[in-house]
Image: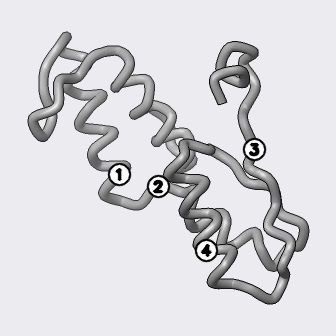
Amino acid sequence: MAACALAGVTPIDSPFFDLHDEPGLKQEVAAAVAMGFPAKAAIHPAQVGTINAALTPDAAAVAKARAILAENAKGVGTVDGQMIDEAIARKARHILAAAGLDA
């Protein structure tokens, strides 16, 4: 993923090929999210909902991202005990973009 970041390319996790193993797909998407992948390839339309559900931030993540950006607008601060700097703010902007929202 570091090579993708250097090249400005979005890394996409490889597809899950067993169309009949929904629990396996969920497990693999969760692992991809944990590794930091912002996207996963699908080989069948039936997989899209599961993939989107795992990659779309929930309401709590969106609320935290908004709190981070509000604190960052003041300069350097903290949210939930975490120091907020530009790197954290950039991640918050990515979370809002993944949720289909503007920063």
Residue in the picture at 43% in, 23% down: 90
* Category of crowding for the residue at label 2, using alpha-carbon neighbours closer than 10 angstroms: few (below 14), some (14–19), many (at least 20): some
* Upstream in sequence: badge 3 or badge 2: 3
Q: Is 58 positioned to the left or the right of 100 in the image?
A: left
Q: Amino acid at mark 1?
A: Ala
Residue in the picture at 63% in, 23% down: 2
Q: Amino acid at mark 2?
A: Pro
Q: Is residue 97 above or below residue 30?
A: above
Tag 2's secondary structure? loop
Q: Amino acid at mark 3?
A: Ile
Q: Which residue is mark 3?
A: 12
Q: Position of residue 7 (x, y in %)?
A: 75, 15
Instruction: Residue at the far left: name it.
Output: 81
Tag 3's secondary structure? strand
Q: Is residue 57 above or below residue 72?
A: below
Q: Amino acid at mark 4?
A: Lys
Q: Which residue is mark 4?
A: 26
Q: Is 19 positioned to the left or the right of 39 in the image?
A: right
- Label 1 – label 4 distance at C-alpha: 19 Å
Q: Which residue is mark 1?
A: 61
